[in-house]
Image (cartoon, rainbow, N blue to C red):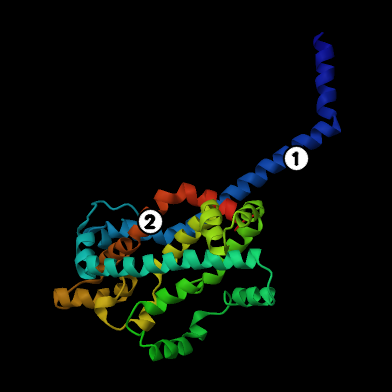
Amino acid sequence: MQTVIKDLSVKWKRNPVVYKIKHWQAGYRLYRVFIYLFLIGLSFVFLYPFLFMVTTSFKSVNDLIDPTVHWIPKDFDVKSYFNAYALLHYLPYFKNTVLMTVLSVLGQVISCAFVGYGFARFNFPGREVLFGLAMFTMIVPPQTIIIPMFVEYKELHWINTYLPMIVPSFFAHGLRGALFVFIFRQFFRGLPVELEDAARVDGCGVFKTFFRIVVPIVTPPLLVTAILSTVWHWNDFFEPAIYIVDRAKFTLPMMLPLLGESMNKATGGTVTSNIDQSTIMAACMLVILPIVIMYFEVQRYFMKSIERSGIVG
């Protein structure tokens, strides 16, 4: 009996099909190990600045000048956060940033959804040309058109206000508006038209159909647009720095380059570079902290919405 089992096992091992399967499985395992290592390394490249910022913001002066301290501080110190909060004059500039961001995001979500719906559902002369022109704006650097835009807004007396950032958002333009129009258009094209046809039969017009029938079922692209628009408007430095002159109207990202000036005024020019580094990292953390908190709160819904909104796949 043992001889028969041994012979069967030998034949099984010598079977070319079994050998190929085992060889393929070994290669697949090696491939997965390589992919995981590559993704870990790539993730570290993106996470390194954030990790450096977090750890440095908690370092004391002794940790900053200690060559043996690289990542984990020996003494966790939160003084840098209090200093950064005071130097940034955080609360008033936080309110400015919230005001500009909320109004811009609100306008962008509504207008981009409506424009995307129009491109997806209505056939009109020049539709494809207009959509192509809208997509073309995604590849045009804003720096190349900032001068004519500045001249135009100056003629409208919008300089030193938030209107150059807010008003375009209500017309499906603004910061990366074309991308959001594309997201909504792709999502609407994948929806059945029966519900809209039924609404029209019941006497609903275009606006009533859009807001009462369509909007309630487009949560995924609405959430994706709202989150991405919030992040980009909150962190935007370029446009506010061009259009806003009055320091009282600055946003939080605009205050970061002025942090060194605030430090010198507060200390009479005696602040050291080590203290600068710790306080600057703490200030950066305070600026992005609301966005980080928001992301962790909506991360689960955000990933589901990305899968359903047509961004990937």
Instruction: Looking at this view, name the residue that lies furthest to the top.
Output: 1
Disc 2: CA contacts within 10 A as few (<14), some (14-19) or many (>=20): few
308 or 53, which lies in front? 308
Picture quarter with the C terminus = bottom right
Residue position marked by numbered label 2 in the rendering = 292
**With respect to residue 277, does 3 lie above or below?**
above
Left or right, 248 with reference to 174:
left
Q: What residue type is labelled 1?
A: Trp
**With respect to residue 267, does 5 lie above or below?**
above
Across and down, in percent, residue 73 comes to 28, 53
Q: Residue at x 35, y 62 (%)?
A: 288
Across and down, in percent, residue 38 comes to 58, 53
Q: Which amino acid does label 2 sit on?
A: Val
Left or right, 115 with reference to 3:
left
**With respect to residue 164, does 47 lie above or below?**
above
176 or 79, which lies in front? 176
Q: Which of marks 2 and 1 is nearer the N terminus?
A: 1
Quick one: SS at disc 2?
helix
Residue position marked by numbered label 1 in the rendering = 24
**With respect to residue 263, does 6 lie above or below?**
above
